[in-house]
Image (cartoon, rainbow, N blue to C red):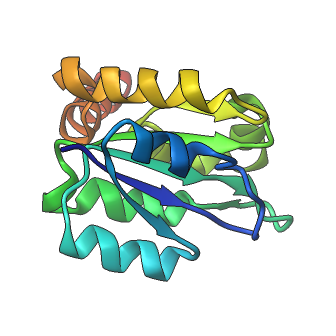
């Protein structure tokens, strides 16, 4: 059974019907209403997929970027695949905070709302099944190599 974590912020229902769809696909679903609650989940369980709501914070940063950094350091989440979900495009998010680029490197992609839950959830599970190169560990390692290459 796949285990999925949905991490919300701002009280925006960006995961509209996704929890129900994952349950219908026989997944165990945890929903965190805050990053502190999400941290408790990620310290206690390993997840096949983590979906994180990321949004500009209005102060030049991105809500969720710090949590992405904690996920990348968690030994339990190294085989997880991570996706952002936002009302903004990835370009808008990164332009709001260029320093968040490194944290965003563990994301397989960023879904923009509105989404079609039936399609998105199936695709996320497919990617978590077949693609070891999409895991947090691989993406973190690959990103480190890219940064070394650029510096050298």
Is 149 drawn above or below residue 63 in the view shown? above
Image quadrant where residue 68 sits: bottom left
Q: Nearer the viewer, residue 18 or 135?
A: 18
Q: Is residue 36 visible?
A: yes
**Relative height, residue 63 to residue 128 (above, below):** below
To which quarter of the image does residue 105 belong? top left
Q: Image check: 6 left or right of 139?
A: right
Left or right: 37 in relation to 81: right
Seen at 15% across and 60% down, the residue is 76
Q: Residue at 25% across / 43% down in the picture?
A: 48
Question: What is the quadrant of the N terminus in the image?
Answer: top left
Q: Looking at the picture, how far across and down is residue 73, in whole percent?
A: 24, 60
Q: Position of residue 5 (x, y in %)?
A: 40, 56
Query: Where is residue 142 drawn, in percent x and y?
Result: 25, 27
Residue nearest the viewer, comparing 7 with 15? 15
Q: Can residue 101 be seen by looking at this rendering?
A: no
Number of labels in the image equals: 0
Q: What residue is drawn where x is 52% and y is 51%?
A: 19
- Quadrant of the drawing holding the C terminus: top left
- Say which residue appears at 74% left-offset and 57% top-offset: 13
Can you say whether 5 is above or below 102 in the image? Answer: below
| Front-most of residues 73 and 88 | 88
**Of all residues shown, which one is farthest toward the left?**
75
Q: Residue 45: image x %, image y %? A: 20, 66
Q: Residue furthest front?
A: 24
């Amino acid at each position: 059974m796949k285990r999925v974590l949905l991490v919300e912020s701002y009280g925006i229902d960006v995961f509209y019907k996704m929890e129900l769809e994952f349950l219908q696909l026989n997944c165990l679903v945890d929903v965190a209403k805050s990053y502190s609650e999400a941290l408790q989940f990620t310290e206690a369980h390993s997840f096949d997929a983590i979906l994180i709501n990321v949004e500009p914070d209005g102060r030049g940063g991105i809500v969720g970027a710090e949590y992405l950094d904690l996920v990348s350091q968690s030994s339990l989440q190294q085989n997880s695949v991570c996706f952002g979900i936002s009302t903004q495009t990835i370009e808008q998010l990164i332009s709001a905070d260029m320093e968040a680029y490194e944290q965003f490197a563990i994301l397989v992609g960023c879904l923009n709302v509105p989404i079609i839950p039936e399609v998105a959830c199936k695709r996320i599970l497919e990617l978590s099944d077949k693609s070891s190169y999409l895991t947090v560990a691989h993406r973190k390692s690959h990103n480190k190599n890219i940064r070394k290459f650029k510096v050298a």
